[in-house]
């Protein structure tokens, strides 16, 4: 059916255009990315630790996306499903911000409680953030918002929660864009030129 093919092309295009966001994050955090790459080749211990935590944070959403991707495409791209996700996300943001405002004011350092930084983030904290990222598989849910919330819950201050959220997005969004391009690239070109 032509309508189904156009919808699949549109849904794939929505994921594929994340390539621009991926490039922007890589450019913005190029120093961190450079340290991660140096860590992967054994030249930066903290960069390796951060790389491991990013991989850990990507595992839950990556697995669920692979297992339930077709089901998500078939049932969660409806207007009502997206509206529900947008409203639920807004309520979550209000709740988390109210909760965060009731916490004691952080010290002037960029670290979270107990001195948590991206380099000292424990694997369990990265897994918590990755678990929150699973909610972003529901279209209309902001991936960065739920991972930032996960960062807050893991004890990161807002700046580091946002930074980790964007760094975690690099491999996950790259993989999703590559998969959609591979599976639906010709349909997108046929539909949009």
Image (spheres, rainbow, N blue to C red):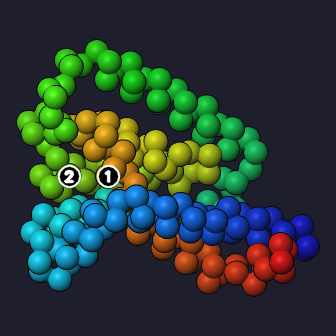
The residue at which mark 1 appears reads as 164
Is residue 42 something one can see in this rendering? Answer: yes
Q: Pinpoint residue 97: horizontal percent, then vertical percent.
A: 39, 24
- Pointer 2 local density, CA inside 10 Å: few below 14, some 14–19, many at least 20: many
Disc 1 crowd rating (10 Å Cα; few below 14, some 14-19, many 20+) is many
Q: Please provide percent x and percent y for residue 187.
A: 78, 79
Q: Secondary structure at mark 2?
A: loop
Q: Is residue 20 left or right of residue 92?
A: right
Quadrant (top left/top right/bottom left/bottom right) for the C terminus: bottom right
- Pointer 2 residue: 118
Q: Nearer the viewer, residue 128 or 40?
A: 40
Quadrant in the rendering for residue 19: bottom right
Disc 2/disc 1 C-alpha distance (Å): 7 Å
Sequence-earlier tag: 2 or 1 = 2
In the image, 51 versus 44, the foreground residue is 44
Q: Residue at x 49, y 67 (%)?
A: 23
Q: Is residue 92 above or below residue 56?
A: above
Q: Quadrant of residue 2?
A: bottom right
Taking 152 as reference, is 3 left or right? Answer: right
Q: Residue at x 17, y 83 (%)?
A: 41
C-beta proximity under 8 Å, tags 2 and 1: yes
Q: Is residue 92 above or below residue 42?
A: above
Q: Residue shown at 55%/78% (left/top)?
A: 178
Q: Which quadrant is the N terminus positioned in?
A: bottom right
Q: Horizontal and vertical percent for residue 43?
A: 11, 78
**Res. 60 visible in picture:** no
Seen from this angle, which residue lies furthest top? 102
């Amino acid at each position: 059916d032509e309508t189904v093919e156009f919808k699949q092309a549109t849904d794939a295009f929505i994921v594929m255009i994340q390539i621009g966001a991926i490039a922007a994050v890589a450019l913005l955090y190029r120093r961190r990315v450079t340290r991660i790459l140096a860590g992967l080749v054994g030249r930066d211990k903290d960069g390796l630790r951060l790389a491991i935590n990013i991989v850990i944070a990507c595992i839950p959403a990556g697995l669920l996306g692979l297992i339930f991707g077709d089901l998500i495409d078939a049932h969660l791209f409806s207007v009502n499903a997206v509206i529900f996700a947008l409203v639920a996300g807004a309520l979550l943001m209000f709740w988390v911000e109210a909760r965060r405002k009731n916490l004691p004011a952080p010290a002037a350092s960029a670290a979270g409680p107990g001195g948590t930084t991206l380099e000292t983030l424990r694997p369990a904290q990265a897994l918590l953030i990755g678990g929150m990222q699973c909610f972003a598989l529901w279209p209309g849910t902001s991936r960065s918002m739920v991972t930032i919330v996960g960062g807050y819950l893991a004890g990161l201050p807002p700046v580091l929660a946002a930074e980790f959220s964007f760094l975690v997005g690099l491999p996950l969004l790259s993989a999703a864009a590559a998969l959609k391009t591979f599976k639906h690239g010709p349909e997108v070109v046929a539909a949009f030129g």
